[in-house]
Image: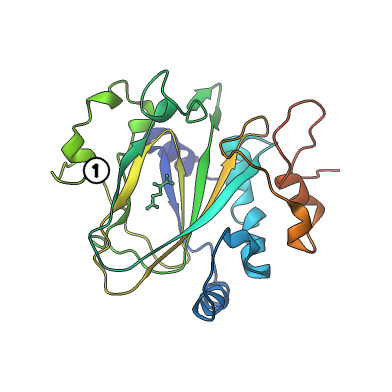
Amino acid sequence: MTGEEKFQVDLEGYLVIKNVLTDDEVAEMNEIIDNGERQGPPSLWGEPFKRLIDHPKILPYLLELLGPHVRLDHDYAIFMEEGPQINGLHGGEDGGGPGGPEADHWYKYRDGIMRNGLSVMAYNLADAPEGAGGFACIPGSHKSNFLREIPVEVRRFERPAHYVVQPSIKTGDVVFFTEALIHGTMPWKAKHQRRSLLYKYSPGHSAWAGYYYDISKYGELTEQQKRMLLPPSIGSRPRVMDTD
Ligand SMILES: O=C(O)CCC(=O)C(=O)O
């Protein structure tokens, strides 16, 4: 992770990581999706999707932002057709403000170290140009002290506000965001289908989902992937990356 990327994540709470997936990787995944009704977690849709658990270009970001014991908490896909559906702006510290219902939504910085609670790596298999809709956020809101003051009509995208941003995303880009950031889903306005695969990570000691991964469903996994899929713990938890 570059110094400028660290600056951006600390400042804004999200980052568009460009050109993570190659054209071949994207084509392979899109072909699998096109050839069958895909249900459940994408990490179970076959080898190319399993590789996203600890994609080599993304793992360094996860270690920097969630720490050496980072774990995959849950994963799912968002496919959208042109239409008015939204998921209003949500998230933020503690899931809406201090003492809120989702205590694993947090961001902290100290002595050069950034750490996040539940965080997302969203792999994009289709373009989301400016104005297309889809992922939207309020940059910097992971550090806001007035989350409960965001007007409902802004949260529902009924009134545009200059501080709500829909980043332009290219096929193959990955969007990192901390769930401590206010974010949501705008209506999808493009003619093509939105395809985003959300792999959500937690620090090794915490969980958002009320279930853990069953590694017997995955066939062959590397030792590193097995460590990434461990249930939460502290004790003698191994680091994800075997440095020996
Ligand atoms: O990518 C999106 O449309 C937003 C995803 C979202 O709301 C979430 O991860 O909680």
Q: Is residue 118 left or right of residue 196?
A: right
User: Which residue is outermost to the right?
Assistant: 244
Q: Residue at x 28, y 52 (%)?
A: 86
Q: Where the N terminus falls, by quadrant?
A: top right
Q: Is residue 151 above or below residue 74?
A: above
- Would you identify the image quadrant in which residue 48 lies? bottom right
Question: Front-most of 12 and 207?
Answer: 207
- Would you identify the image quadrant in which residue 152 lies? top left
Find numbered disc 1 in the image and state the secondary structure of the residue it sits on: loop
Which percent across, then down, holds residue 173?
A: 46, 61
Q: Is residue 47 visible?
A: yes
Q: Is residue 163 visible?
A: no
Which percent across, then down, holds residue 178?
A: 46, 38
Which percent across, then down, holds residue 120?
A: 50, 46
Q: Is residue 127 left or right of residue 152?
A: right
Amino acid type indicated by mark 1: Val
Q: Residue at x 53, y 80 (%)?
A: 31
Q: Where the C terminus falls, by quadrant?
A: top right
Q: Is residue 103 left or right of residue 14?
A: right
Q: Is residue 63 above or below residue 116?
A: below
Question: Front-most of 116 and 60?
Answer: 116
Which percent across, then down, holds residue 125?
A: 46, 68
Q: Residue at x 56, y 36 (%)?
A: 208
User: Which residue is outermost to the top?
Assistant: 99
Q: Residue at x 26, y 69 (%)?
A: 190
Query: For mark 1, what is the residue?
Result: 164
